[in-house]
Each structure stands twice: as C-alpha cells, then as structure tokens.
Amino acid sequence: MDIGLVLLICAIFVLILFSGFFSGSETALTACSRARMHSLARDGNRRAALVNTIREHKERMIGAILLGNNLVNILASALATALFIRYVGPEGVVYATIVMTLTVLIFAEVLPKTYALHAADKLAMVIAPAMRWIIFIFSPVTEMVSWVVRNVLKVFGVDISVVNVGDHLEILRGVIDLHQGPEKGATDQRAMLRSILDLAEVEVCEIMVHRKNVTMIDADSPIERIVAQVLDCPYTRLPVFRGEPDNIIGVIHAKWLLREMKDRGNIEDIRIENVAAEPWFIPESTSLNDQLQAFRRRREHFAIVVDEYGAFMGIVTLEDILEEIVGEIDDEHDIAVAGVRKMPGGSFLIDGTVTIRDLNREFEWSLPDDEDYSTIAGLVLYKSLHIPEVGQSYTFEGFRFDIVRRQRNQITLLRVTPPVEETGGANEAGGR
C-alpha cells in the first residue's frame, strides 16, 4: 500500500478528532453549570476554578475554539479533496464534498456535542487545562479578529461593549421555573425560592392583617376585662389603644401580663400602660425584605403599619413574612379559614380577600399581581372598571371569574375557572 495514502488518511482522521475536540469543548464550556463550577472552585477544585477563569473571557474562548475548529476542518477537507482527485479524478471534488460533509457532521459535530451536552460539567473540567494553552497560543489571532469585528459592528452602530448581558435575577427566576423533581416537593421548592426573590418587591401592606381583623385592647377598659380578653385571645401580642383605634399607645404581651399578675398578686393594682411595650410604627410601603432585616436587628416580632398620614392600617409580624417564604404556618391556636375550595369540574370557590400571590403560589397560576390591587376581588374590580353584580362573569388572562356573592360594594366570593392550558397571553376583560 502507498505509504503516502496511509499518511494522508491518518492525517485526515487526526484532524477529524481535533474537530470533534473543539466542537465538544465549545458545548461543554458554554453549557456547564456556572453555579456548580463556582461551588466546586470554592471547595478547592482547581479545574473548576480554571473553567471559571476561561468562562470569564467568553469572547476570547469562543474565538480560539472557532479558529481551531475551522482550521482543522478546512485542512481536513483540503486533504480529502486532494486524495479523491488523485485516485478518482476531477469528480473527486464531488465525492470529497459528500464524504467530508457527512464525516464532519456526524463525528466532528453531532456526536461530540451530544456527549458534551449530557456531561458538560465533567467534560469542561477535563478539557480546561488543554483549552487554556490553546487560547493562549491563538490569542494574537483572536485578538486581531475581535478588533476587526468590533470596528465593523461600530460602522453599523453596534457597540458590543455596552450590550446588556441580561438581568441575573431574571435568569435565576428562569432556573427556578425549570427546577424539576417529585411533583409536590418541586412545587413547594419553586414557590419558596420565588418568594425569597419577591421579598424586595412586596410591601408590608400586601400581607398585613387589616385593621378590621385586628384584635385590640382598650386601655380605658376595666383591668378585669382586659385580663379576660388577653387570656381568651389566641394571639400573644395585642395592640393597646386609648380613645380611638388610631391612638395606639402600646403593645401588650400575654406573658408580660401574666408575670405582672404574679408579681403583684392583685390585678386591681395593674396599670396596663406599665405592662405594654412601646409600639413600633412602620410605613405601609416598607418592603418585606427591609422589614425582615429590621425585625432581626431590633429582635422584634410585631409592628404597627400606618399610612402616609399616620393612620392605623394593620399589623405585620415576623411570622407573616416567614409565611410568605415557606407557606402557611399553622399551630393549635391558629384559626383556619377556608379561603379556597376546589369544586367539581376544576373550578374554585375563592373568598374575595384571598391574595393573588397566595393563589399563584399554591396553584402556580400566572394571574397579574399589580400594585393597584393585591386580592382576587381587587383584580376583578380593576379589570372590570366597575362594581359587578352577582351572577356576572368575566374572562381575562385565560381565567373565568363568576361573581357568587357581594356584600355592599365588596366582592366576597367568586368562582374561578382556570384555563385548561395557560398560553401566557392576556385577553381583554369582558362582562356578561
């Protein structure tokens, strides 16, 4: 056999291997998990740290890989063309094109990239040392190519130095949405992670206990009645007011009152002002993240929410914020309120006061949650632009809303029918 033929075939084979190496390296280095590489590098894995270093200069990395890949592919095609022309004649160009196209496509593109896609983290750490040297060797050429590319793009008004690479928070939200696992466990985990990211965007007025639902102590009431009210109440902390509910003078803790009763022996000698702690007032526009940090700094669990005029709006507790992250925390003293009841046929009977955040969290719906409203009743009022009558129906966001009960101007109960398959498109509201 002609030694020249053998050497030519071996050279083409080696070049195809190099092409596969470059193709697989590109996929592995771009598809590997940034979070996992960061975690491994923090634990002392040098190869993971090298992967992170290479990825910090993606333009240089991609340039070197493309340069190497095109170089070996063109050279392999040129050698194959020469080989076929030598043994077949002028028609060898056609044969070389067909054979090399199939060979490069299967063995230098699809095969290595498929494997790299399924083992990106492992392969990235394996090829990182070699890629470091390849990038270094090709750096003069890639830098020149990058300079040419930048200046050509500037001619067309594109400056890649100011191109926005995307919002990392939105990327994180996307990763959370893609999280998979056992149905119930994955749903709960996605809800918790989304809620943590939302803490900075949600205000305390959206989760507070409204003033009409707050149990309060009148400081002017007889001490016997105050003691009985505190002992009969399922809550440990209660606001104390004098004269009118907006005039809050303190916060009483059941444990403090019991200790005072034990120390004095005679409840007639107890003055509620001496037992109550100074109230902590916060504006309703405070974000949950800021309030959570404030609770930690002050070592407090209870705050009074007021509006811009100083009027009493409601209360918020540390437990309220934690429930926004982990879901409802019920104990033996909590009063269970069935705000959502699933009905046959896939619809839900929902109290008007149930918040949209809770519904989106529980059922992974995508109802709009705007600053102009926070409850399901508020959503219907905002979309319909008037106070609907019992029996009216509305359809928007793919959901059907039927008004079941109304008390004065307040929607108290709705039947909500979610779409069979949410498309993400919003429909215009319409009444019937």
Image (spheres, rainbow, N blue to C red):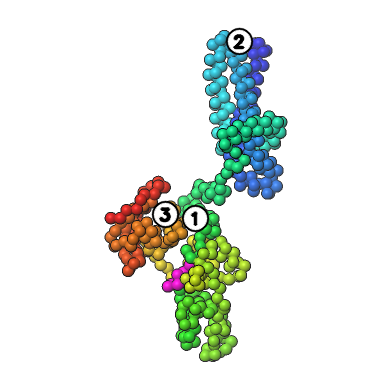
Residue under label 2: 86
Type of amino acid at the residue the image marks with label 2? Arg
Of the 4 image quadrants, the one containing the C terminus is bottom left
Is disc 3 placed on a helix, strand or loop? loop
Location of residue 65 in the rendering, given as x and y in whole percent from the top left corner: 63, 31
Q: Which mark is residue 191?
A: 1
Between the C-alphas of marks 3 and 1, the distance is: 15 Å
Q: Amino acid at mark 1?
A: Ala
Quarter of the picture holding the N terminus: top right
Q: Position of residue 174 (x, y in %)?
A: 52, 47
x then y, percent, for residue 33: 59, 43
Q: Residue at x 68, y 41 (%)?
A: 53
Kindly state the secondary structure of the residue where label 1 is placed.
helix
Q: Magenta stretch: give its range.
A: 208-213
Classify mark 2: helix, strand or loop.
Answer: helix
Given contact means CB atoms under 8 Å apart, are the residues at marks 3 and 1 in contact? Answer: no
Dot 2 surroundings within 10 Å: few (below 14), some, or many (20 or more)? few
Count numbered badges in the picture: 3
Rendered image: mark on residue 367: 3
Residue 50 in sight: yes
In the depicted structure, whether residue 286 falls above or below residue 428: below
Task: Categorize mark 3 by other alpha carbons within 10 Å: few (<14), some (14-19), many (20+).
Answer: some
Reading the chain from its start, which is encountered first: label 3 or label 2?
Answer: 2
143 relative position to 414: left or right:
right
Mark 1 residue crowding within 10 angstroms, few (<14) / some (14–19) / many (20+): many
Percent coordinates x, y for residue 95 in the rendering? 54, 15
Disc 1 from disc 2: Cα separation: 66 Å
Residue 116 is labelled as none
Q: Is residue 185 above or below residue 318?
A: above
Q: Determine the residue positioned at 58% across, 39% down.
A: 31
Q: Earlier in the sequence, mark 3 or mark 1?
A: 1
Q: Is residue 80 above or below residue 411?
A: above
